[in-house]
Image (spheres, grey):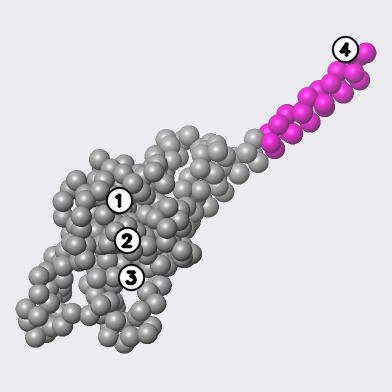
């Protein structure tokens, strides 16, 4: 059997699958855990050329797109241009920034084998392409969010440098913006990518569940997720420290103003007693 190829891209933070489904005439309400699978005549209309039965594209709500047996760059660019009509933030020229290639080989060995570039299974099962596509989609989406987390760390490092130089005041807007970035990062990781959730087929088929778990472990999705969770907790701890320092400085400033007002009032009273002031 000819190898099945996969090309996965993380192109957005979120893709509204229902908008695309309505435009394609698909009468189905999609939830976050279900990918939109496009193939046959629907895919041909989008890429504007004839496709075979083995070609399909899976679109995920958390911003990843996986092309199955679709290797021509022009077809990929045309499809992403189509998706961009629904999600304008997609940058087609930068699509390779968060991307991965993989392939499925069947019957080439009598045992299961996983590598960085391909997986070998003794016998093909209908669930293999969707599960591989799901793992790849989550992997490239995590790669995108890992980079975003690095940018948040860089911003916090700048704030720490300012504290070390004695510039203790941090504006409320800056604190709120950085906190919002951390919350958005955690929300994108947990709610959108749903690392801890499994496709429905894995609950119905034990072999599908085993295959998905082995793919998940090989791509270290759970470990990467735990690392990001722990880093996020550190970020929250740092932001709590910044907030405490900022509020302490503001409280001290208010206290000095109160003291200054009391001193002025005392001076005025003394001057009035001395007859200097009426």
Kindly state the secondary structure of the residue where label 4 is placed: loop
Looking at the rendered image, the disc whose residue lies closer to the viewer, 3 or 4, is 3
Q: From this view, report whether residue 268 is shown above or below residue 100.
A: above
Camera sees residue 262: yes
Callout 3 touching callout 2 (CB < 8 Å): no
Q: Is residue 136 left or right of residue 272?
A: left
The quadrant of the picture occupied by the C terminus is top right
155 or 65: nearer the eye? 65
Q: CA distance from mark 3 to mark 2?
A: 28 Å
- What residue is shown with label 3? 222
Which numbered disc, 1 or 2, marks the residue that appears first in the sequence? Answer: 2
- What residue is shown with label 4? 276
Callout 4 touching callout 2 (CB < 8 Å): no
Q: Is residue 97 left or right of residue 200?
A: left
Looking at the rendered image, the disc whose residue lies closer to the viewer, 4 or 2, is 2
Rendered residue at 42%/52% (across/down): 23
Which numbered disc, 4 or 2, marks the residue that appears first in the sequence? Answer: 2
Q: Which residues are magenta?
A: 254-278
Magenta span: chief secondary structure:
helix
Rendered residue at 54%/44% (across/down): 176
- What residue is shown with label 1? 46
Residue 270 occupies quadrant? top right
- What residue is shown with label 2? 38
41 or 125: nearer the eye? 41
Kindly state the secondary structure of the residue where label 3 is placed: helix
């Amino acid at each position: 059997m000819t190898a099945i190829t996969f090309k996965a891209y993380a192109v957005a933070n979120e893709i509204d699958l229902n908008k695309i489904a309505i435009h394609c005439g698909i009468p189905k309400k999609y939830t976050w855990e279900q990918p939109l699978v496009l193939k046959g005549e629907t895919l041909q209309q989008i890429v504007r050329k004839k496709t075979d039965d083995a070609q399909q594209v899976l679109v995920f709500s958390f911003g990843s797109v996986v092309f199955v047996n679709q290797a021509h760059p022009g077809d990929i660019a045309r499809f992403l241009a189509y998706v961009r009509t629904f999600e304008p933030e997609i940058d087609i020229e930068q699509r390779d920034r968060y991307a991965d290639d993989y392939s499925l080989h069947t019957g080439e060995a009598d045992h299961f084998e996983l590598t960085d570039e391909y997986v070998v299974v003794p016998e093909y099962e209908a669930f293999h392409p969707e599960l591989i596509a799901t793992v790849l989609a989550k992997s490239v989406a995590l790669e995108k969010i890992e980079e975003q987390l690095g940018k948040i760390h860089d911003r916090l490092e700048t704030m720490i440098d300012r504290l070390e130089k004695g510039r203790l005041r941090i504006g409320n807007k800056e604190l709120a913006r950085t906190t919002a970035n951390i919350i958005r990062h955690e929300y994108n990781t947990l709610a959108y990518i749903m690392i801890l959730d499994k496709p429905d087929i894995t609950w119905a088929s034990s072999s599908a569940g085993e295959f998905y778990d082995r793919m998940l472990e090989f791509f270290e999705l759970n470990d990467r997720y735990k690392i990001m969770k722990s880093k996020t907790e550190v970020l929250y701890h740092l932001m709590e420290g910044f907030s405490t320092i900022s509020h302490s400085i503001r409280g001290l400033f208010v206290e000095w103003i109160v003291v200054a007002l009391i001193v002025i009032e005392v001076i005025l009273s003394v001057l009035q007693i001395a007859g200097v002031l009426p």
